[in-house]
Amino acid sequence: MKWIILILLFYNFLNGQKLAPPLDIPLEVAGNFCELRPDHFHAGIDFRTRGIENLNVYAIEEGILRRVVISPYGYGKVLYIDHPNRNLTSVYAHLNQFSPRIESLINQIVHQNKSNYLDTTITDLNFQISKKEIIGLSGNTGSSIAPHLHFEIRELISEKLLNPESFFDIKDEIPPVFNHILLYNLDIQPTEYTQKIDLQDINNGIVKVPFKNIGLAVSAKDFYTDYKNTMGVNQIRFYKENQLIYQIKFDHFLFSNQSQINAITELKPPHHQEVYKLFSEPCGSPIFNSVTDGNLQLDENKVTNLKIIIEDFVGSINEINLKMQFKQLKLKNPVNSEDATLWINCDEAVEIYNPDFELFLKPKTIPSCRFFSYKKNILSHSNSFFQLELFDQYTPCLKPFQLHFNIENVISKTLITKIYLSYNNEKLKKKFVGKLNYPFLEFENLKHFGNIELKVDSNPPVIQLVKGDLKKNDENRIEFTIFDEESGISDYHVFINNKWEIAYYDPKKKMLSFEIPNSINKKLNRVQVEVVDLVGNSAKKEFELVF
């Protein structure tokens, strides 16, 4: 028993220790844990790298290299390191390159697979990483829009996301601030905000509300040491008559709950993803341990006293108190039944069959009940031949859904393999290819409603050699411009004298680059570049280069 107690004490001691910082500059936050992002909560912390790339990145603790991913999208070049002694996994994303010994291992795997995309689990349990070991250089790879280090901490087995601020000393000098409040009428579905309440209106006295059953959402933001970056709050507490009725707290998070962001924030402009709903949607999954569902029932003969407290990770708070009362008003019917032919219960599975398409929704795909509406347009010109507006682009989607298009007699069979689906929403331009089950083209895991088009891409990608073959400051790198204006780049390969070589594609710059292997002497070399787009159109170009 004595030994068990000692072991537990030692384990608790280890887990109470701060981790080594992943950068050797003061840790400054550019994006914090679980702040609101398009379609997801931010899974970690973005650390500033002073606007530059290639800073040393360090392992926060001793561990074992577990996983490596290389992609032009998402996290770009990313490392996953397990720390069994802390029951943690650390994640380092958007790296420019890995350390020499990691790079050597990864290059072997990439060459074996002859693929520039990589997502591999390291099976060698002896690939030990030391605490404070340099594991790579910071960068801007993947979907990053500026140089920084995206950093995560997860539980080792469950992969539950943890707030990295718990493990580091990060300066936070500015308390969170309120912007405004949105009011939702919960007597109708779908739930939509009906009124914006400014802070000035709150301070002027009692807010009269024309609905008895309401929900509130708060627009709030946080800062750390300056006002350069707007970030999310760590915690929100909502009180009615001094009794806590709803709470949001971002100490940890499950990946399986990522889509629930569409149930707790507003998707419609001008408040797009800037508010936190302080109530549960009828078919949203509960992701916070709240006392109630946050729904308020107002009384015409009684004033309801409410309080909202926002808090950052270090405990700095801000609060507002407001008084609300129901006041009967004559309102227009809020439901627009135009094009609304079917009422959808959000907690039931839905199958919709139309001569031109089929739609399959799982239970709780949408957070609240609503009429199903759509608009379609079949075109006979240009590369776009079928347009479909499904609900609208602001309708929240909580689960993947299936959409099957009937393409019989709509397009020539010779072009079927060149079809792709394109979203044309205001902030979404994703593209997908479907599975042919003639006469249907099936898309199985779509996650957005709104403006959808079926298009045909018959044109191959474009390949161009960057003028001035060798860069002045980097004579070992060759760069090409590659792009595809329709379905987009899917794959790419570089051969030097008929030998496959590692290359990296940066879609932000439309740049394909590769390092000249040390084994090649400076002489005339034959360089072949092959690029394939999403629907399989390919382009090949050959260059004779001296290096």
Image (cartoon, rainbow, N blue to C red):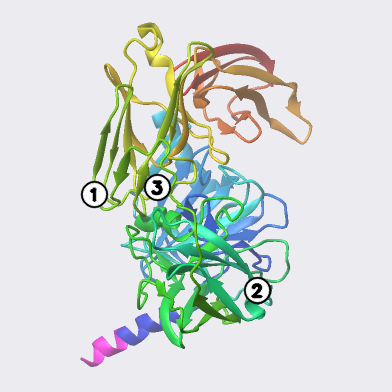
Q: Position of residue 104 (x, y in %)?
A: 49, 42
Q: Position of residue 338 (x, y in %)?
A: 43, 38
Tell me where residue 224 appears, x and y as whole percent: 66, 71
Question: Which residues are the magenta region?
Answer: 1-7
Real-space CA distance between mark 2 and mark 3, rounded to the nearest whole angstrom = 33 Å
Q: Is residue 261 above or below residue 162?
A: above
- Point out the frontmost of discs 1 and 2: 2
Up-down relation of residue 413 to residue 511 (above or below): above
Side of 519 relative to 491 (left or right): right
Total count of labels: 3
Q: Is there any visible trace of residue 329 in the rendered image?
A: yes
Pick whichever, 357 or 542, lies toward us.
Answer: 357
* Numbered disc 1: secondary structure: loop
Q: Identify which residue is drawn at 49% across, 41% down.
A: 393
* Mark 3 vs 1, N-terminal side: 1
Residue type for callout 2 = Asp
Residue at left 25%, top 41%? 350
| SS at mark 2 in the image | helix
At label 3, the amino acid type is Cys
Disc nearest the viewer among 2 and 3: 2
- The quadrant of the rendering that contains the N terminus is bottom left
Marker disc for residue 348: 1
Rendered image: mark on residue 201: 2
Q: Quadrant of residue 298?
A: bottom left
Going by the numbered disc 1, the residue's amino acid type is Glu
Near mark 3 (Cα within 10 A), the count class, few <14, some 14-19 or many ≥20, is: many
Judge whether 502 appears above or below 262 on screen: above
| Front one among 355 and 90 | 355
Residue occupying the point 59% across, 12% down: 541
Which residue in the protein does label 3 denote? 397
**Mark 2 or mark 3, which has the lower sequence index?**
2
Q: Residues within 10 Å of mark 1 (few under 14, many from 20)?
A: some
